[in-house]
Image (cartoon, rainbow, N blue to C red):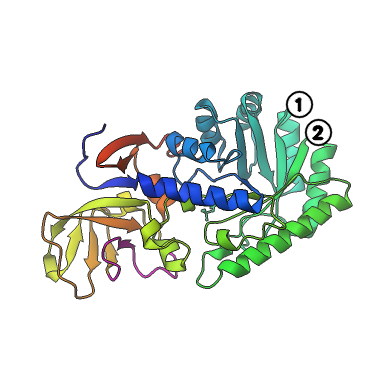
């Protein structure tokens, strides 16, 4: 068991984490769809193992480096949900990875898929065509998915299906609408593949805010990531009640300057994300009316909304706005259960390529 670290440190409430993992696994199983969680949220082998043990078919990652970390640690089925633009070195790594595991990656252009096919040569790695369902980040228009898929087969790459990330669910009152857009885009993309003679095996979607609304009559696979921990963004969007939040930053009250609470957790451990709809730089789990109103590298200034200030030297649990960003700032998170701490390495931390 690990000794209690000095603050600030990231604490995982292990019973809550297990509950979140189980709840979404049961949701997917009941709906008859595959669950392939995005592990960029936790980057931890221990948590991936919990997800796989509860029925996940494999994992989703964003980079080849993340994929390598998890495959090295025994994961056998990985989808890199990103439109990779390969070079010689990354193609070699991807080809090697596909020898050790079942691997797929994203493509969203004729040029990208042709480049990948040329550099990869013979490989069992397959592609999924990314389509834009309304987030307007990467992804082709759904009706163009057939052209990209046909290029893949013509150049020797197997096509597994289509995927989208309904990231426009990250806005107030947008959860159900984004899920409807997701289903519509995937259905149209699947039709575009069929029009060129390809039957998609996988129609993959999923973000944490839209998860409960995902149309499992259309989708065959869900890829949420943040659901394992929840965070202040999900709390404010209404997709994670505070009692389900499983990761907090244990912090110490170091100052009462100007009649406010100052904590020792700043942007270097909480992350600096602040979405337009966020009501502050983070929340306090046990003080729902409190808001972090100022954040610098090692200080968080909290407005408690008139409530009595927690005493100097006392500790509070901060809920980061965006948990993926916070986890990527530390080497280790500490999972607590029955008063005992386990140190879990953030094994894929910083692996951006
Ligand atoms: C391609 C892709 N799939 C799945 C996810 C997981 O969604 P969330 O972070 O809302 O859990 C993300 C998140 O960024 C993503 O980019």
Q: Which residue is mark 1?
A: 122
Identified at 61% across, 45% down, the residue is: 81
Quarter assignment of residue 276? bottom left
Instruction: In this rendered view, identify the residue nearer to me: 127 or 247.
Output: 247
Q: Is residue 94 left or right of residue 65?
A: right
| Residue that mark 2 sits on | 156
Residue 183 visible in the snapshot: yes
Please state the extent of the stretch shown in magenta in the rendering. Answer: 275-289
Q: Secondary structure at mark 2?
A: loop
User: Answer yes or no: do the residues labelled 1 and 2 have beta carbons within 8 Å?
Assistant: yes
Task: Tell which circle, 1 or 2, labels the residue nearer the N-terminal end.
Answer: 1
Alpha carbon separation for disc pair 1 and 2: 8 Å
284 falls in the magenta region: yes
Q: Residue furthest front?
A: 30
What percent of the width, then of the height, locates residue 309? 15, 67
Estimate how packed mark 1 is, as few (under 14), some (14 to 19) or many (20 or more) residues with alpha carbons within 10 Å: few
Q: What secondary structure is the stretch in magenta mostly built from?
A: loop
The number of callouts visible is 2
């Amino acid at each position: 068991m690990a000794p209690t670290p000095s603050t600030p440190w990231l604490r995982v409430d292990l019973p809550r984490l297990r509950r979140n993992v189980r709840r979404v696994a049961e949701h997917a199983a009941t709906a008859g769809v595959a669950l392939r969680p995005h592990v960029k949220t936790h980057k931890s082998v221990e948590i991936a193992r919990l997800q796989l043990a509860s029925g996940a078919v494999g994992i989703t990652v964003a980079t080849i480096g993340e994929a390598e970390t998890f495959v090295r640690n025994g994961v056998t089925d990985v989808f890199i949900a990103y439109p990779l633009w390969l070079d010689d070195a990354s193609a070699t790594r991807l080809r090697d990875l596909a020898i050790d595991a079942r691997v797929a990656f994203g493509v969203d252009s004729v040029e990208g898929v042709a480049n990948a096919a040329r550099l990869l040569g013979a490989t069992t790695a397959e592609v999924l065509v990314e389509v834009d369902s309304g987030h307007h980040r990467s992804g082709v228009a759904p009706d163009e998915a057939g052209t990209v898929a046909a290029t893949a087969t013509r150049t020797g790459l197997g096509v597994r299906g289509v995927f989208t990330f309904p990231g426009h669910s990250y806005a107030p009152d947008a959860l159900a609408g984004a899920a409807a857009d997701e289903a519509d885009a995937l259905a149209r993309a699947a039709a575009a593949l069929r029009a060129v003679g390809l039957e998609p095996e996988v129609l993959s979607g999923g973000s944490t805010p839209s998860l409960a609304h995902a149309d499992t009559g259309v989708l065959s696979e869900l890829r949420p990531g943040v659901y394992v921990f929840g965070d202040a963004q999900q709390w404010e969007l209404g997709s994670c009640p505070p009692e389900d939040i499983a990761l907090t930053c244990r912090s110490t009250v170091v100052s009462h300057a100007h009649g406010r609470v100052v904590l020792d957790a700043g942007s270097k451990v909480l992350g600096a994300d602040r979405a337009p709809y966020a009501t502050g730089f983070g929340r306090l789990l046990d003080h729902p009316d409190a808001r972090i109103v100022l954040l610098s590298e090692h200080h968080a200034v909290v407005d408690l909304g008139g409530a009595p200030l927690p005493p100097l030297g006392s500790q509070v649990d901060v809920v980061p706005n965006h948990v993926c960003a916070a986890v990527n700032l530390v080497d280790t998170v500490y999972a607590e259960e029955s008063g005992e701490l386990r140190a879990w390495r953030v094994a894929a931390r910083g692996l951006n390529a």
